[in-house]
Amino acid sequence: MKKKLILLLAISLTNADEGMLSENQYGKNLYENPRGIACNKCHGNKGEGDVIARYKHKGIEKTLFAPRINNIEFSAFAKALHTQKGVMPIYFLTDEEITAIYMYLYRP
């Protein structure tokens, strides 16, 4: 009976780990959908930067770019996520969420 209980406990712990996200997967999920607006839609799949839109203003062709964000220091990254600037929304992310996204962008 005791051996069966230990075996059952070991199996349940193994299965519990399968349901958990890795730190990298957690960061990826946040980057792709932090609060309904995906970072990757503007900044690219791994933060390399991308074109958001092309448009004309007073007859002049314009391009709106999202900057590269996978090459900046953490303090600048975190500040950008807490500050409204241009078309960049404020996401109201926790420090842990910001760290997870940053770590995801900086992993090969």
Image: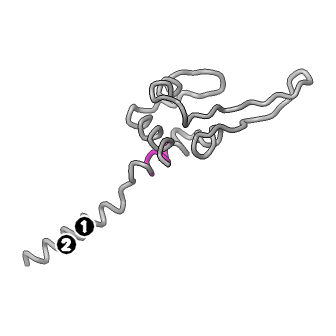
Q: Is the magenta stretch mostly helix, strand or loop?
A: helix
Q: Under tag 2, what secondary structure? A: helix
Q: In this rendering, would 3 be left or right of 16? A: left
The span from disc 1 to disc 2 (Cα, nearest Å) is 6 Å
Residue under the image location 25 percent in, 67 percent down: 12
Residue under the image location 87 percent in, 28 percent down: 61
Q: Under tag 1, what secondary structure? A: helix
57 up-or-down from 102: above or below: above
Q: What residue type is labelled 1?
A: Ser
The residue pinned by badge 2 equals: 8
In the rendering, at what x and y percent does residue 74 appear? 45, 29
Q: In this rendering, would 16 be left or right of 53? A: left
Q: Which amino acid does label 2 sit on?
A: Leu
In the rendering, at what x and y percent does residue 65 appear? 71, 32
Q: Which colour scheme is used?
A: one colour
Residue under the image location 47 percent in, 37 percent down: 102
Q: Does the magenta stretch include residue 27?
A: yes
Span shown in magenta = 25-30
In the rendering, at what x and y percent does residue 1 appear? 8, 78
The residue pinned by badge 1 equals: 12
89 up-or-down from 17: above or below: above
Residue under the image location 49 percent in, 23 percent down: 79
Taking depth in this image into account, of 31 and 34 the one nearest to the observer is: 31
Question: Are the residues flagged by discs 1 and 2 in contact, CB closer than 8 Å?
Answer: yes
